[in-house]
Amino acid sequence: MNFVETQRQLGITPLNAMIGSINPLFRMPFDTVNKYKGSVIAESFKYHYDNNEFYRDLCLRKEISPNDIQGFTDLHKIPMIPVQTFKQCDSHLLMTSHLKDIEYEMRSTGTSGIPSVSRRDRVSVDNAFESVLMTYREFFRISRGMGLFLFPPTEEMPEMGMVKALNIFAGMLDGSANLVKKITFNPAHAVEKLLSWEGKHTRHIIGPPFLIHRLVKHCIDNEIKLNLEKNSLIITLGGWKQFTGKEIPRKDFNELCSKYLGVQIQNVRDMYGLVEANMLAVECREQEKHVPPWVHLSLRNPRNVLEEVEYGQRGVIAIYDPTCTSYPGFVLTEDVGYLKEDTTCECGRNGQKLVYISRMPGVEVGCCAINLEKFIEEKEKEVVSQGGTNV
Ligand SMILES: [Zn+2]
């Protein structure tokens, strides 16, 4: 009897047992966890195959059925949904659940202006919150302190995936303040806020890299050196390539955060995620991005995405996320990266470690952070052209 069957017999949902066990699973041998994740992903595949006509047709054309997907070694055969499909006007065809059962819609708009819509039903929302919350607890152990949020309040942008995912930190901290209001950001206010918390709280800064970079730039220009606490974290999510096309080099970013914000370099942590998936790959203190133990990443040959590339080789990132019930969570992204050959880590965790490189050349630039940057720049230009001040 395999992992899934054993749990099911006890009336337990195997996937949720895994999410709740993130801590021990990260410390189990790679092969053991692969067996477990192979079973839950195979179960998820069967669920979508049985309940989603559009997806079943796609599988039939590729001559793949649940009989072919028995466990971990078969995962690469699972037909993937290219992420562009979420942008098409008939994207509702992707749905496994009925539209009337959709609880939450997330959107992300690329430079083309066509939104990518991902719809989640009750179970997908349950799983998404559980997955993100457990991942944050595992990597950050946050339960106290203050959060300087360099992103808009969720009520201003309720459908933006990045905002929704980062806002989960609010419930884990003693308090927080959103420094992006009505799509404007004033770094001087951010510094004031940080100083007002000094000596009273551990201060954390959370947001997309470009806004944290703006804060640091403001400190450089005004010769301000902050001294955050020993356990303060800088947590980033969103693209490293700015809207202007200029990339922020990670090493420089770490050093600037250490010099001007006074945080330990090992506490600067980036995360990788996708609006269409319910997972975040979060950096440990070694700054390695760990893939959650219930998710499988498969890196594909850019010239032939049906072919998997070896660990250590660059490829297009495909995500197999079994937490999604509203549509098949088997997404071929437009992101390029590689998996580290060594599946162990100095931090004590085992499993896949992702190195994100860039978006695929030629695809439109579009992620939450880049859109936010574009909105802020446009807003600032508007204010200036109306003769107002930019601060
Ligand atoms: Zn690690």
Image (cartoon, helix red, strand yellow):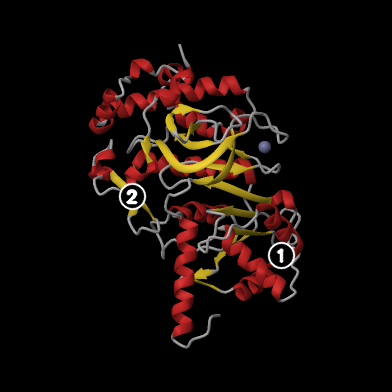
The numbered dot on residue 282 is none
Disc 1 target residue: 200
Q: Residues within 10 Å of mark 2 (few under 14, many from 20)?
A: many
The numbered dot on residue 117 is 2
Residue at 53% over, 60% down: 245
As rendered, which of 277 and 85 lies closer to the eye?
A: 85
Real-space CA distance between mark 2 and mark 1, rounded to the nearest whole angstrom: 42 Å
Residue at 54% over, 23% down: 34
Q: Is residue 37 visible?
A: yes
- Quick one: SS at disc 2? strand
Image: 112 above or below 356: below
Residue at 28% over, 39% down: 94
Callout in the foreground (2, 1): 2
Residue 346: give x, y in percent of width and height.
73, 34
Residue at 42% over, 37% down: 332
- Taking the image in four quarters, ligand 1 sits in the one at top right
Three-letter code for the amino acid on which mark 2 is drawn: Val
Q: Quadrant of the C terminus?
A: bottom right
Q: Quadrant of the N terminus?
A: top left
